[in-house]
Image (spheres, rainbow, N blue to C red):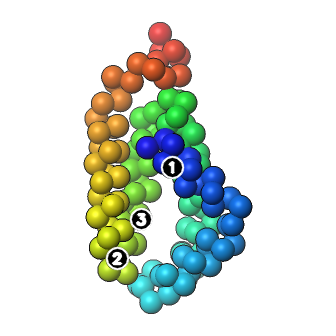
Amino acid sequence: MGINFLGHGLVRFTKLDGFRDWMITTFQDSLIPTFAVTVWGSVLPFLEFGIGLLLILGLFTYRASSAGAIVIIILLFGSTLIENWEWAGMQMIYALFFYFLISNVEKNSWSIDNLINK
């Protein structure tokens, strides 16, 4: 999940305006106000990058996994509002992975968290 989120954020850094504009166009007929889509489209790449980096490093793993789960919940809600069931299905799989990470965080022995807590 760390590589996935980091990669999603990283590739969007070079095209922030285009990504945000794509989101606005995609959600223009949804119940979500354009202002909210604009803010989310501006913030999402940074959230993805930060969460991904923390997961890769194993730093604040529980918090990063919880934040990732919240991001997926928000994305899932948006996908259902525009009736994009393919996206929603994929996001449900991501949600399962975050559930697995959160419920097994105490087994995370290869991490900075583990080094700090020794």
Q: Position of residue 24 (x, y in %)?
A: 56, 81
Q: Amino acid at mark 1?
A: Phe
Q: Which residue is the site of mark 2?
A: 84
Q: Which mark is residue 75?
A: 3
Q: Residue furthest bottom?
A: 29
Helix, strand or loop for disc 3: helix
Q: Amino acid at mark 3?
A: Leu
Q: Decide if residue 105 is on the left or right side of residue 50.
A: left
Q: Quadrant of residue 80?
A: bottom left
Give the CA distance from mark 3 to mark 2. Answer: 11 Å
Q: Position of residue 107 (x, y in %)?
A: 33, 22
The quadrant of the picture occupied by the N terminus is top left
Q: Amino acid at mark 2?
A: Asn
Badge 1 crowding class, 10 Å Cα cut-off, few under 14, some 14 to 19, many 20 or more, is many
Name the residue rendered at 32%, 45% in the picture: 97
Q: Quadrant of residue 85?
A: bottom left
Name the residue rendered at 56%, 60% in the picture: 44
Residue 7 lies, with reference to residue 64, above or below; the image says: below
Q: Earlier in the sequence, mark 1 or mark 2?
A: 1
Q: Nearer the viewer, mark 1 or mark 3?
A: 1
Helix, strand or loop for disc 2: loop
Q: Inspect this view and state whether residue 41 appears.
A: yes
Q: Which residue is the site of mark 1?
A: 5
Q: Inspect this view and state whether residue 60 appears.
A: no
Badge 3 crowding class, 10 Å Cα cut-off, few under 14, some 14 to 19, many 20 or more, is some
Q: Decide if residue 21 is on the left or right side of residue 112.
A: right
Name the residue rendered at 36%, 68% in the picture: 87
Give the CA distance from mark 1 to mark 2. Answer: 20 Å
